[in-house]
Image (cartoon, rainbow, N blue to C red):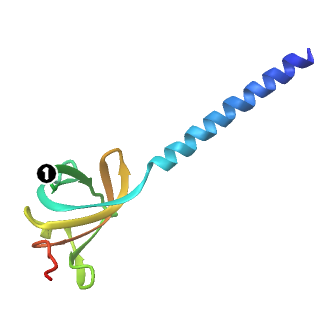
Amino acid sequence: MRRRILTALALCLGVGTVAAGSAAAQEKKAQQGHLTGMVQGINKQTSTITVRTGNMKRDIIYNSETKFLYGTEKKNKPSSLDELKDGWYLNCKGTFEGVKLVATGCRFREEQRTTQQ
């Protein structure tokens, strides 16, 4: 009888640990990151911006909390999504949901600046 109770208790603790571990794994999946690229399209109905990074297209999701800036990292000013245009360079930071970035902040400008040596 004692053995059965101990076995049941150990089994319950094991299931509880697995459930807590999977909840921690869900939180861990929301990775911080950023995406940069040239704007290929803005869809206001789905709140997404498509950017081309290299030869891939990636989606960035924005919402009412997303802050937009116009300019470079050192010199920028507050802006809005309405000023962003196709072909402009966009740099966004946020958290990834799968392969899509949910942006908390985006900075854009007409072209990507390259450093010349």
- Give the residue furthest to the top: 1
**Whole-percent x and y of residue 106?**
26, 67
**Whole-percent x and y of residue 55?**
13, 51
The residue sitting at 35% across, 44% down in the picture is 98
Q: Is residue 32 left or right of residue 73?
A: right
**Whole-percent x and y of residue 51?**
17, 56
CA neighbours of label 1 inside 10 A, class few (<14), some (14 to 19), many (20+): few
On screen, 74 above or below 80? below
The residue sitting at 61% across, 35% down in the picture is 19
The residue sitting at 20% across, 70% down in the picture is 80
Location of residue 42 by image quarter = bottom left
Q: Secondary structure at mark 1?
A: loop
**Whole-percent x and y of residue 67?**
30, 69
Location of residue 3 by image quarter = top right
Location of residue 62 by image quarter = bottom left
On screen, 3 above or below 85? above
Q: How many numbered badges does the structure rendering display? A: 1
Relative depth, front residue between 64 and 29 = 29
The amino acid type found where label 1 is placed reads Asn
Q: Which corner quadrant holds the C terminus?
A: bottom left
- Give the residue furthest to the bottom: 75
Pointer 1: what residue? 55
On screen, 62 above or below 78? above
The residue sitting at 16% across, 79% down in the picture is 115
- Give the residue furthest to the right: 2
Q: Which corner quadrant holds the N terminus?
A: top right
Relative depth, front residue between 80 and 41 = 41
